[in-house]
Image: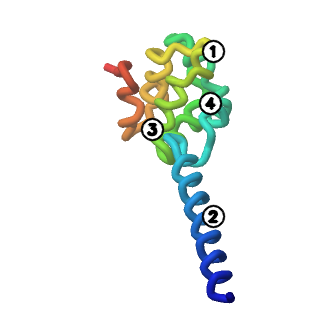
Amino acid sequence: MASNTNKAWFVLMLFVVSNVFLWDVEAAGECGRTPIRSAAASMSPCLGAAKNVKAKVSPACCAKVGALIKNAPKCLCAVLLSPLAKQAGINPGIAITIPKRCNIKNRSAGKKCGKYTVP
């Protein structure tokens, strides 16, 4: 009888662990464990520069973009091409120029984003 209980316990634990692992894999996207909405919200200092190529890019924006490129390079494109960015009126073709306008070195993620490319 104890053997059946141990087997049932083992199967239950295996099921729980596998579900946690699968959830963990699904949760890790372009921005890691950070939801794209949160990553996009953190980029609020860049709103003006993302809408107008002639707008001055603030130091706060450059710091956010630099950190994002360093920690999760694919996240920048995910944020710029997200529905939330579109709702905010961000022009991805202009927004992708921000890393260059901030003089961020090693900005591979800031050169091409979907169909948008920085010359």
Q: Nearer the viewer, mark 2 or mark 3?
A: 2
Q: Quadrant of residue 90?
A: top right
For the residues labelled 4 and 2, say whether their Cβ atoms are less than 8 Å apart.
no
Observer-nearest of 51 and 24: 24
Q: Amino acid at mark 1?
A: Gln
C-beta proximity under 8 Å, tags 1 and 2: no
The residue tagged with tag 2: helix, strand or loop?
helix
Q: What residue sits 60% from the left and 12% below the top?
A: 89
Mark 3: few, some, or many residues within 10 Å (few <14, many ≥20)?
Answer: some
Q: Does 21 sit above or below residue 2?
A: above
Q: Are marks 1 and 4 in contact (CB under 8 Å)?
A: no
Query: Which residue in the structure is indicated by mark 3?
Result: 74
Label located before the other in sequence (4 or 2): 2
Q: Quadrant of the N terminus?
A: bottom right
Considering the numbered disc 1 on the image, is that residue within a helix, a strand or a loop?
helix
Q: Nearer the viewer, mark 4 or mark 2?
A: 2
Q: Nearer the viewer, mark 1 or mark 2?
A: 2
Q: Circle 1: is it few (<14), some (14-19), or many (20+) Cα within 10 Å? A: few
Q: Residue at x 37, y 40 (%)?
A: 106
Q: What amino acid is labelled 3 in the image?
A: Lys
Give coordinates of residue 41: x percent, y percent: 67, 30
Q: Which residue is mark 2?
A: 16
Q: Dot 2: within a 10 Å radius of its alpha carbon, few (fewer than 14), some, or many (20 or more) residues? A: few
Q: Between disc 3 and disc 1, whose residue precedes?
A: 3
Distance between mark 3 and mark 1 Cα atoms: 20 Å
